[in-house]
Image (cartoon, rainbow, N blue to C red):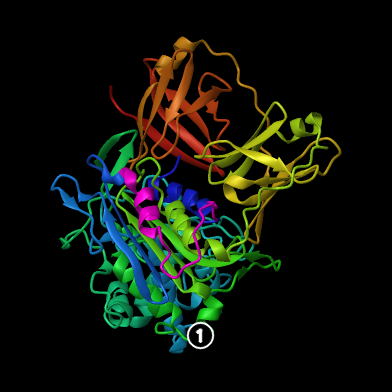
Amino acid sequence: MKKIIGFVSFIIISLNFTVSFNLQARETSKKPGLDSCISNIFRRLQIDTMPGASALVSQNGEIIFQKGFGYANIEKKIRVTPDTKFKIGSISKQFTAAAILKLQEEGRISTADKLSKYIPDFPRGNEVTIYQLLTHTSGIHDYDFQPNLDVSQPVTPQALLDVIKKNSYDFNPGERFQYDNSGYFILGYIVARISGRTLGDYLYETFFKPLGMTNTGIYETNIVLDNEAQGYSMKDETVKKADFQEMSWALGVGSIYSTTVDLFKWNEAVFNGKVLTDATLKTAFTQAALNNGGKVDYGFGWFLSINRGVRFIQHSGVSSGFFSYLERQPENKLTVCVLLNALPAPKGINPILNGQAISEFILADKMEKQNSGVSDTTVNENNLKKYAGRYDYGHGMAMLITLKGKQLFGQVTGQAPNPLTAVSANEFYFKAMNAKIKFVSDTSSIFERLIQYQDGVSFEANRLKDEKPVKINPDFFDKLTGRYDFGNNYVIEIIREHDKLFVLTPNMPKYELLPTSELDYFMMEAASRLSFTLNKDGKAASLTSTFDGMAMPGKRLGD
């Protein structure tokens, strides 16, 4: 249970490890059917009154498709066009990274520098490098996962930096990769400190103005933009305006607005050496290295992946009411950009998956055939039973492995169950994420963890303790139902349906709460727990969500 930015960011990261689509195209320079393919993807936005998306595709420096779908502003009946401005969320990170690298080319900073050189009083700053901030390997705790921050009110850079300083590290610098907004806020802070200008002014003078990106800038609450998209959220078929978010909390992290056309200009400039030197770009697009020599498919502000033998450089982004994706396939000089003004999104609309479907349509003749996995029928049912359980993916996320008949299924928090295909006795192909999962045991009978391999990256997830729910009188559940406010417009709801208790969380499916006592509950599909406290009248007054050793209190709202 986290604030919307951080929780959705983690989902986006997992999706950035590339989900494949099997779309075929005839070999031709014009790619017949591209218009129909893209229009079909976004057909949901062309009916009724829906939020909108702007999509752009370019190849060899030429725009081959650009179109808007749905509404930029439903209330005012303003439709999306290629000139509509969207908040682009974490796509902003590549601009912050480029600013650091430009300053390095000018000799004003080095990625090898220690954080303490620029912020002397930062805790353990002499252990953290600029390189680790750029690659999400610093271990600095992500402020976005901190409870009780009021992101509806403005914050100064110094005040947010002071908040970040107070948190303990999640791990020692360089030990592992963990997507971290704090690192990019600090980088934006450093850019301003070195340049003597605000981050927005530096980006404008260094990148936006020279590249003709006239519809791009740092979003400021008190400025009304021409052609600005309104952010929305979807719940089932209901559309409502998204909760307000003060963008000063996302400086350097996700505060930029732009258009598909301007992001096309940016990609063309970056990948044609007009922003940074070839030598700098080579390092920016190199896998990050951990202390133990391990590699991570993240560079400096860009995700790096291999999809069916083809290299992609990309990033997604979310903000309250917005979801964005920008991708480059450098060898074929292909750019795909999708910007959406809805989060949660309409059914079937996901800029990451939509964008990847478009690129696969265009590059189908250059990509390897889909890996369907190799079935190994020798895996017996008794062995499959040993793999079933919950595995900790961090940040409250879990992989739930279940066995139905003789078929294993994997389900990551927030996603549907998908089948696992055996390729050996303890290795399985997870087609839904184009990944391989290996179950590992340090004993002869218990499998303590799994290792997931994806696009050259591997990570381990330890098995969570098997828990059995206890029997509770269902009438007690009535004492717990209601809405709980965690601050920053983040509210969850506890509901009873017949003899079961469920939690409704923004952007997530409905999950059943399983009791270990009258006041303590867990979910099979997640790695977080909920604990209730009662008031003197015997009804719930608050609940606390715990995950990764953190506790987030929520106050029950009045009936």
Vertical comparison of 279 with 138: above or below: below
Between 271 and 282, the residue placed more toward the observer is: 271
Any part of residue 242 in sight = no
Mark 1 — residue? 278
Vertical comparison of 148 with 109: above or below: above
For the N terminus, the image quarter is: top left
Vertical comparison of 91 with 484: above or below: below
The percent position of residue 202, horizontal first and vertical second, equals 31, 78
The tally of labels here is 1
- Magenta includes 373? no
The percent position of residue 427, horizontal first and vertical second, equals 75, 46
Between 80 and 240, the residue placed more toward the observer is: 80
The percent position of residue 252, horizontal first and vertical second, equals 37, 66
Of all residues, the one furthest to the right in this rendering is: 444
Query: What residue is rendered at 47% in x and 64% in y?
Result: 314
- Magenta includes 23? yes
Q: Quadrant of residue 514?
A: top right
Any part of residue 148 in sight = yes
Q: Main secondary structure of the magenta part?
A: loop
Asked whether, in this view, residue 161 is left or right of residue 331, the answer is left
For the C terminus, the image quarter is: top left
The amino acid beneath tag 1 is Asp
Asked whether, in this view, residue 29 is left or right of residue 428, the answer is left
The percent position of residue 9, horizontal first and vertical second, equals 45, 52
Query: What residue is rendered at 54% in x and 55% in y?
Result: 18
Q: Which residues are magenta?
A: 18-44
